Image: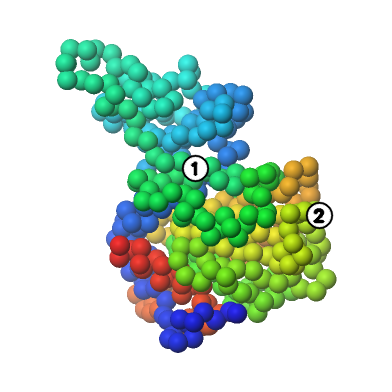
Amino acid sequence: MVFSKNQCERMQFGLTQEELISQSTFDLETQLVFSKHWICIGRVEEHVADFEQACFFRTVQIGDYELIVVSTKQREFRAFHNICRHRGTRLLDETSGVLPNSCMTCPYHAWTYDVEGQLIGAPNMGGFEEFQRQEFGLQEVACVDWGGFLFVHLSAPKSAFATDFVAIMTRLRDWQLDDLQLVSRIDYAVEANWKLLFQNYSECYHCPTVHPSLNRLTPYRSATNDLEEGPILGGPMQLSEGCETVSVDGLKIAEPMGSLNEQQKREVYYYTVFPNCFFSAHPDYVMVHSLERLTTSRTAVHCYFLMERGYELNSIERAMRQWDEINRQDWRVCELTQRGVQSPAYQPGPYSPLESMVAAFDRHYRRVMRS
Ligand code: FES
Ligand SMILES: [Fe+2]
């Protein structure tokens, strides 16, 4: 059903201007949201040039933080703050490459760290008895590889990744994300706050007006939710009679994944994962949006398309074209909302019962911001 219990009992109003777009909220989010949750930093494939090349690195920006993500031949990933422990210099100045001699050497006074972050060289520091190299290793950040995506946690996570993500892992188990290949990615720059993008993805109330073509493929009233409260929200939508997937003509772009049951082959599963991912699992492909919060009014979006192995890039084309159109329609209304919310005259309005997941997102967001 579309209506969550809470929503039916009491009308909920949207977030205030202060909550949506103020600089003070943005700064507080850095501490309470983006430093205290698992953040998707992209695909595994983007973080390795070649697994045969040991010690490939990439730098990743999350707000004011910059991380070094190092991959090893064993397909293991480690992440460190890109800060030298001597005087705080940015350690690696390139965005990606292979670490010479599997080491990271600071460009200032040549303190050198191994791929485990241990300080293995500190010239001319031998004069102090109390100087212990092992106390000055790089600051490590938890880094997990799941479903072919990398996630990092900027502060010591209170629970294991598998505990935090169990709901989405269970829901998407049959798509076997780890075995899928990345076939394409589209990047977008959206002039809107990241929360407006979350709210937009969380409801299909707007589908008849904003996405007439999508609404023919998956009618908006077919949306149901099987995760209605908390950090992971959403559920399935039915494909219309005669439609096999979301593509420009509604016809499949590949055979439905063999591991799916008959019901899963007739539905598209939409889930938001707080605070920076949307998963959209179709019978024949999976689309994942990962959001990068840039400013109070700008968000970068990376849209990944995954298929079973063996398909060529052009197989995804009919799906990508359809989703690119839908994405652009969504970004436009998010940008229009940003414009309206910026006005001093903005006042939060009431949500429809069809926006129960937007209301749930807001409730979760407020809980996190009060924590
Ligand atoms: S700041 Fe890095 S070695 Fe001095
Ligand atoms: Fe939309």
How far is the residue under mark 1 from the one under mark 2? 30 Å
Which three-letter amino acid code belongs to the residue tagged 1?
Val
User: Is 335 rendered above or below residue 206?
Assistant: above
Q: Please name the residue shown 60% across and 79% down the image.
A: 1
Residues 156 and 92: in front is 156
Mark toward the start of the polypeptide (1 vs 2): 1
Front residue of this view, candidates 133 and 18 = 133
Q: Quadrant of the C terminus?
A: bottom left
293 to the left or right of 112: right
Is residue 3 shown left or right of residue 230? right
* Circle 2 residues within 10 Å: few <14, some 14–19, many ≥20: few
Confirm or reject: label 2 Cβ below 8 Å from ligand 2.
no
Query: Which residue is rendered at x = 47% and y = 16% of the image?
Result: 101
Tag 1 near tag 2, CB within 8 Å = no
In front: 270, or 312? 270
Q: Secondary structure at mark 2?
A: loop
Q: Position of residue 145 (x, y in %)?
A: 53, 42
Q: Position of residue 169 (x, y in %)?
A: 57, 55
Residue hosting label 1: 144
Query: 56 above or below 314?
Result: above
Q: Position of residue 40 (x, y in %)?
A: 50, 49
Residue corresponding to mark 2: 255
Where is residue 96? Give x, y as percent: 51, 31
Classed neighbour count for the residue bearing mark 1: other residues with Cα under 10 Å, few (<14), some (14–19), many (≥20): many
